[in-house]
Image: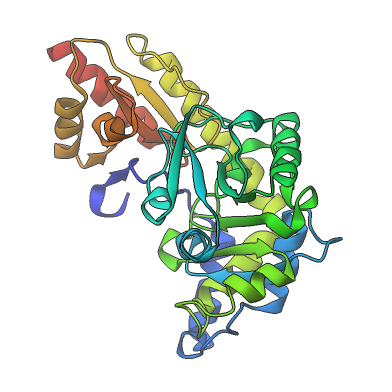
Amino acid sequence: MENNKYIFDQMTCHIPNRFVEESLKRSIKNEEYQEYAPPMGIPLLHELILEDFKLKDTDAVVCVTDGSLPAIFQTVSQLAFKTFIDSEPAWKWPRLYNNNSLELVPGKIKPSDIMEDSLVNICNPQNPMGHLYTKEELEKIGRKAAEMGAYILYDCTYKDFTMDEYYPLYKLNSERTITTWSMSKSPGMAGMRVGGVICSPDMMEKIFKFRPNQLGSSFPGQKAAIVALYLKDQWLPALRKIVALNRDCMYNNLPDCTFPMEDASSSVWVELPEKINSTKLTSELKKEEMFVRDGIYYQEYGYEGNFIKVGTAVPLQWIADLCKMIKKYMDIY
């Protein structure tokens, strides 16, 4: 690994993607980094995104943004609603963007949690818990939201790690469903800042017509995203296999630990034995340039376990090395 660093704490992908790399090289050679991209994104990228999200046969439209966060910020800060409904613990940024009433739901959000004139944040698989909503659960949530006049913020950044479980909620509640995603996870393009939003034409005109990236997101990044989506069947199965092998490696090589979460995305929740403090372990691993997420990061969201969070979209050797270091630390203490 370049710079001898093992980056497990950002849940991003560190498996080389040769299709992305080749596209970026071509784009740089063609000096496209000197150009502004189309304000809403490259039209071909729009087509591939709608196909990937099973929305090609709908009226849904796309806006490419600088990763998913700007799209989430626009939605939460600009949309008119009364209550923001989120799951706890969960990714903090959507809640920090919210200036309305807040309702936190333990675990998965259920139809009974949805209120009138609310915005419901469905992150699937959930970040950071890894909960995966089934198709049946999503259908019930979509119908209830439509019945209550609620909006749905559907964060699908980790959808590529759930095999064929993705369900297009837009088709149930098209006027009030805002789907967001990022290219930072499965194709490993975190540094390129490419993501976006899918919504109805009216919603796009209302919420996303004016936004901070009015001059377009990274042109080379969008070109690479086009290639990644077009050739997804040539790299995603191998990535999923690596993630599964890494998960099994941790399960099999850390017998003193437990794994209480579903881990449906690209990370593993490692509950440590009582004698091992998560902060001390994280600090010791950092000395070896192994960066994992200390569980105390999530305590403010209601989880008080003694654990670390480890990204699994990484080379197999990284996980093997990490397991060795954790066991070595446990043997000492």
x, y percent for residue 78: 50, 66
Can residue 164 be seen here? no
In this view of the protein, can residue 83 be seen by the observer? yes
- Asked which colour scheme the image uses, the reply is rainbow
Give the residue at x 58% y 40%.
Answer: 124
Q: Estimate the x, y position of residue 8 in percent, counting from the top left.
A: 35, 40
- On screen, residue 175 versus residue 25, left or right, reads right
Nearer to the camera, 321 or 142: 142
Task: Count numbered badges in the picture.
Answer: 0
Which residue is depicted at the point 61% across and 78% down?
40
Asked if residue 330 is positioned above or below residue 242 in the image, the reply reads: above
Q: Residue at x 75, y 43 (%)?
A: 147
Q: Is residue 60 above or below residue 185?
A: below
Q: Position of residue 5 (x, y in %)?
A: 26, 47
Kindly indicate the quadrant of the structure image that contains residue 81.
Answer: bottom right
Seen from the viewer's position, the closer of residues 157 and 90 is: 90
Q: 133 left or right of 262?
A: right
Q: Quadrant for residue 273, please give it.
A: top left
At horizontal 37% and vertical 9% (from top left) the residue drawn is 255
Horizontal and vertical percent position of residue 157: 55, 50
Q: Is residue 164 above or below residue 228?
A: above
In the visual, does 51 lie left or right of 234? right
Q: Looking at the picture, tell me which residue is in the foreground, 113 or 310.
A: 113
